Image (tube, grey):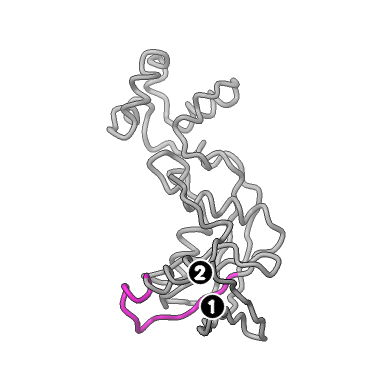
């Protein structure tokens, strides 16, 4: 793999890969809250029965349908809260593998309606590289920066949960963007692929 060099400047970082320089601008992350527990307890828009009748939960219906039949009318979040408090580990089967982690809430205040490549940096090391084909503010404020109860489940957003929990565990995380507003989606994907193939990044792992 190609060694990546990071050169710091007053505005952000220049990431050098071979003869190519990609300049990331530093964007401030505002942390609202840390160490948020049990977000999935608040998933109460469906009952246990409605959830088990969803095709994505058919396996769980086969496993647990009879065992928890008397709980069918309970709201899902309340049901899982009861299981966890009773020490019944079956509640984890409803969640993705990061759904019971501790999370944080953070945001960016700038009105960044641009798209492009972004990175998270910890202790002067790139931890994560990602692409944004809508806009950076939406990706952070409505995605990674705020975990909703539905994100925690097996049909939720495992990647969001994973990355958010990693950020929560760090004292300081820096965020950088490389603007590609006038570029086509394929060009953004190609640049992300180029960076990811140049080296391995600790937080860029498959979450499935």
Residue position marked by numbered label 2 in the rendering: 198
Mark 1 neighbour density, 10 Å: few (under 14) some (14–19) many (20 or more): some
Percent coordinates x, y for residue 96 in the rendering: 47, 39
The residue under the point 42% across, 78% down is: 114
Image coordinates for residue 207, horizontal then vertical, percent: 47, 47
The residue lying toward the viewer, choosing from 197 and 94, is 197
Residue with the mark numbered 1: 17
Instruction: Tell me which segment is drawn in magenta.
Output: 175-189
For the residue pair 49 and 159, the one nearer the viewer reads as 159
Residue visible at 58% across and 57% down in the picture: 202
Q: Is residue 177 magenta?
A: yes
Looking at the picture, tell me which residue is in the foreground, 197 or 180. Answer: 197
Q: Secondary structure at mark 2?
A: helix
Q: Quadrant of residue 14?
A: bottom right
Q: Is residue 136 above or below residue 207?
A: below
Instruction: Identify the mark at residue 201; answer none if there is no mark.
Output: none
Which residue is found at the position 67% from the left and 81% from the top?
Answer: 8
Check residue 115 for magenta coloring: no
């Amino acid at each position: 793999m190609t060694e990546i060099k990071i050169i710091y400047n007053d505005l952000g970082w220049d990431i050098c890969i071979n003869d190519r320089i990609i300049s990331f601008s530093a964007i401030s992350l505002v942390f609202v809250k840390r160490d948020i527990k049990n977000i999935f307890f608040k998933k109460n828009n469906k009952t246990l029965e409605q959830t088990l009748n969803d095709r994505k939960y058919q396996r769980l219906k086969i496993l647990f349908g009879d065992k928890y039949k008397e709980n069918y009318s309970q709201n899902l979040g309340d049901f899982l809260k009861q299981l966890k408090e009773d020490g019944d580990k079956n509640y984890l089967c409803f969640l993705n593998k990061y759904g019971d982690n501790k999370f944080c809430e953070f945001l960016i205040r700038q009105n960044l309606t641009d798209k492009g490549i972004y990175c998270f940096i910890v202790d002067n090391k790139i931890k994560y590289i990602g692409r944004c084909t809508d806009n950076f503010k939406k990706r952070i404020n409505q995605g990674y920066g705020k975990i909703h109860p539905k994100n925690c489940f097996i049909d939720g957003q495992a990647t969001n949960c994973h990355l958010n929990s990693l950020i929560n565990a760090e004292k300081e995380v820096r965020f950088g963007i490389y603007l590609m507003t006038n570029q086509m989606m394929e060009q953004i994907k190609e640049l992300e692929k180029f960076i990811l193939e140049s080296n391995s990044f600790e937080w860029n792992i498959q979450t499935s």
